[in-house]
Image (cartoon, grey):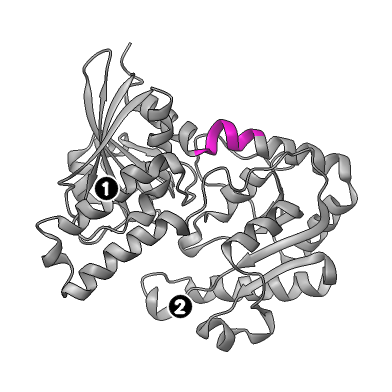
Amino acid sequence: MQYHVTLFLCPGQDLWTSSQVFTGLSELERNNVVTFETDCGAPLDPRFSSLIWLRVTQSGTGRTRTIVIDLADSAECLSAIALESVALYFKRHYSAAALLQLPAAKRTRVWPFGFWMPCLNWSAMRHYSISAFKVFLHPDSGSVCRRWSEHARQLVKNLSMLYGLPSSTTFATDPMRPRDLSVIFQTRLWRPEDNSAAPDVDKVNEERANMVRSLRSAFRERFVGGIVADAYSRTFCPDAVVSAHTSRRAYIRRTQHALVGVFTRGLHDSLGFRLPEYLAAGVCIVSKAIQDVIPAPLAVDVHYKSYQSINECISQCDYLLTHPDEAQRMRIANTKYYVEWCSPKQQMLLLLKRCFSDVQ
């Protein structure tokens, strides 16, 4: 064993955000790289519900470090509580410009985490299910959840993820397998009343609806997807909604068969989990320029085609559909990138190594 890792839980915690970490650590445990346990006692920062607290001990040296993974969409928001108490702060939406507000001593603690993709492998289910009950039985959970019914609903929600989340290998396909000459873009809208802290919520929703309309018009039967139907989307953009074949299983199957996947930004200009799903599936990606700091950059014309306007997006999709050799090279590159940098096991291993990169 190289590391011992303790994942700390908060009262009333939604474990969905931590599922990728559960999966990565459990896979490393299977490979005898780590021993892994969960425990209560994570520091509670009411403003930050997307923090994952870990204590990591390196077996060879006995060195121990407390770290945190911040999965928040916003690059500007960092937890002052975490920055005061951790050795390293791994930020999903990492922006060097946003860090300039921090003192230099704290700035050096913040590192890019990389992509986030909720998933749960069989190897993680034991740790995950035990943790769901630990959160439920946490002595402070009653104060976090105002009513017992709310407290119970959180337990049910956490346990439902045991069968509601895909495994990290679900999207994986052979990059040499023939694909349909189709373009996929299936996404959801954000309800403004639930995301009042995001100033770009209306812009993101409008961009997604316009993208669906334009792709559907340009590619007709070769376009797959649309805006997933719910009460809000049916009112906001009824002409862009798709109600059939939107289950998780159906979406995965359609992604695995499509040649090209279109990606648009999330709230706060963040990179959502559609991007690592595309990488895992070996899909050719068309996206706006990816300038976020991630552990390994995605290269234009190698991992994705870049666009600035919807018309340019359509042109890039058409280019990949009509240039099979270049599309094949991109599919292979994306599959390789996912394995080396993006799979939960590899991502957590690289993170653990970073914790002790100064130890010879």
Q: Residues within 10 Å of mark 2 (few under 14, many from 20)?
A: some
What residue range appears in magenta? Answer: 336-343
Image location of residue 267, percent across then percent down? 48, 64
Q: Quadrant of the C terminus?
A: top left
As drawn, which residue projects farthest toward the bottom?
Answer: 235
Between marks 2 and 1 in the image, the one whose residue lies nearer the viewer = 1
270 on left or right of 102: right
> In the rendered structure, does residue 354 fall within the stretch colored magenta?
no
> In the rendered structure, does residue 342 fall within the stretch colored magenta?
yes
Contact, CB < 8 Å: mark 2 with mark 1?
A: no
Q: Amino acid at mark 1?
A: Ile
224 on left or right of 119: right
Residue at label 1?
Answer: 130
Any part of residue 354 in sight: yes
Residue at label 2?
Answer: 191
Image location of residue 67, percent across then percent down? 27, 37
Write the residue at 36% across / 20% down: 357
